[in-house]
Image (cartoon, helix red, strand yellow):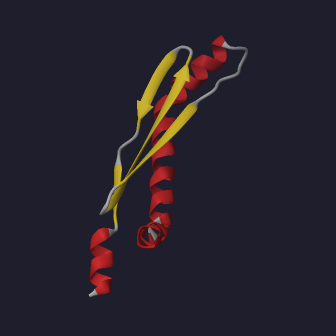
Amino acid sequence: MKKWLDKQKSQEKNMLDAVGIQVREVVEDLIPQIRLCAMENEMLSDLRLNIHFEFNEDNTEVWSEGQVYFPPKQSVSTAFEIGYGKEEAEQDS
C-alpha cells in the first residue's frame, strides 16, 4: 500500500494538470449551452462536473464530463493516461 501511495504522490502534479486541461475543454464546449440556460432561467446557469479517476498498476486514467441540465447538453473530455510504473522500475534498478 505504501509503495502505491508513493507512486501516486510522485504523479500528483501531472494529475492536477490533466484535470485542469479537461475542465477547460468541457467548459469551452458547453459555454453556448450555459448562456442559453441562463437566458431560460432568470440569468442563472449551473454546470455539473464529474471527474473520473481509474487507478491501475502502471497508470492512472483521468477523464471529465460536464452537464448543463436545461436545455440539456453533455460534454466529455479527452482521457489522459498518466503512467508511473516504468519510471519507478527504472529508479529501483
Left or right of 88, for residue 71:
right
At horizontal 50% and vertical 44% (from top left) the residue drawn is 23
At horizontal 51% and vertical 58% (from top left) the residue drawn is 16
Residue sitting at the far top: 40
Q: Nearer the viewer, residue 28 or 7?
A: 7
Whole-percent x, y for residue 93 in the image: 26, 88
Question: In the rendered view, would you say 92 is above or below 17?
Answer: below
Give the number of callouts: 0
Residue sitting at the far front: 1
Q: Nearer the viewer, residue 7 or 42?
A: 7
Question: In the rendered view, would you say 62 is above or below 12?
Answer: above
Q: Quarter-wise, where is residue 88 in the image?
A: bottom left
Whole-percent x, y for residue 77 in the image: 40, 40
Residue sitting at the far bottom: 93
Question: In the rendered view, would you say 61 is above or below 3?
Answer: above
Question: In the rendered view, would you say 86 is above or below 65?
Answer: below
Whole-percent x, y for residue 38 in the image: 65, 19
At horizontal 32% and vertical 84% (from top left) the residue drawn is 91
Left or right of 11, for residue 39:
right
- Which part of the image, by quadrant, shows the N terminus? bottom left
Whole-percent x, y for residue 36 in the image: 58, 18
At horizontal 50% and vertical 32% (from top left) the residue drawn is 66
